[in-house]
Image (cartoon, rainbow, N blue to C red):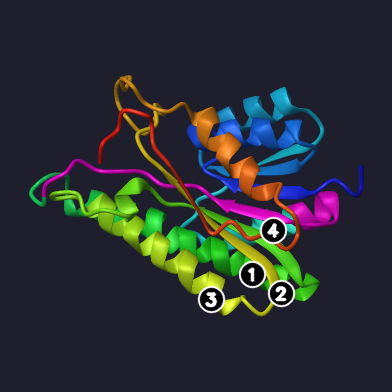
Amino acid sequence: MADDPVMVITGASSGIGAATARRAVEFGHRVVLGARSEDKLAALADELGDGAVPLRCDVTDWDDQQALVATALERFGRLDVYFANAGFGAKRGFLQETPEFWRSMIDTNVYGAALSIRAALGHFREQGRGHMLLTSSVAGRRVLPGSLYSATKWAVCAMGEGLRQEVADTDIKVTLIEPGMVDTPFFDSPVKDALEADDIARAVMFALTQPAHVDVNEVLVRPIHQAG
């Protein structure tokens, strides 16, 4: 339907992104799915049906980010929500990983999120409304020993709050999604006593389904036995 809301999701091929796409479609959204894994994106789009469009996207590429917005507008005629979800982690310890790996993580988690904001914000300002969501982490609310990943998520939290203040005189909403331990492809092996990706997807939909005058700025979700 032409009036159904449209949502762009980065990092959509698996984990929280894919789970959110499924929930969003269930709630009546149409979705533009962005990620680098084209085969997984295509499979997810087939599963979700005509209301889902896959598009290869490297979030560190400005042209790719702009293409997500353009695709939403060309295919569906509107853009209501942009979920900047793409990101990945690193081993703790400042002697761990390679400098090249660090650069890639910072580019994806920080620069990529900033490009997502920039790609969506112009359109949101033109239409006078919209909802920007960014995936941060519990690690963006507490310092973890030797964790450069944590520093990137602190940056995402700062961007989200900075954007919220910038658009506070408009009807644009901003929400930070801050998961605790989640059993997703983020980890190399299954994680015990963790949240499921769909738990975070439901938190996203909670933020999206509030009345027009309500802006849920942060949703911090931990599994029940996670102390930190």
> Which of marks 4 and 2 precedes in the sequence?
4
Is residue 90 toward the left or the right of residue 17 in the image?
Answer: left
Q: In the rendered image, which quarter is residue 22 located in?
A: top right
Disc 4 and disc 3 in contact, CB within 8 angstroms: no
Q: Secondary structure at mark 4?
A: helix
Callout 3 amino acid = Gln
Marks 2/4: CA–CA distance: 13 Å
At x 57%, y 29%, the residue is 39
Number of marks drawn:
4
Measured as percent of width and height from the top left, residue 49 is found at 78, 28
Please name the residue shown 82% across and 32% down the image. 50
Tell me which numbered mark, 1 or 4, is placed earlier along the sequence. Answer: 4
Q: Which residue is mark 2?
A: 125
Q: Secondary structure at mark 3?
A: helix
Instruction: Provide the residue designation for mark 4.
Output: 69
Give the label, 2 or 4, closer to the camera. Answer: 2
Upstream in the sequence, badge 2 or badge 3?
Answer: 2
The amino acid on which the numbered mark 1 sits, given as a three-letter code, is Leu
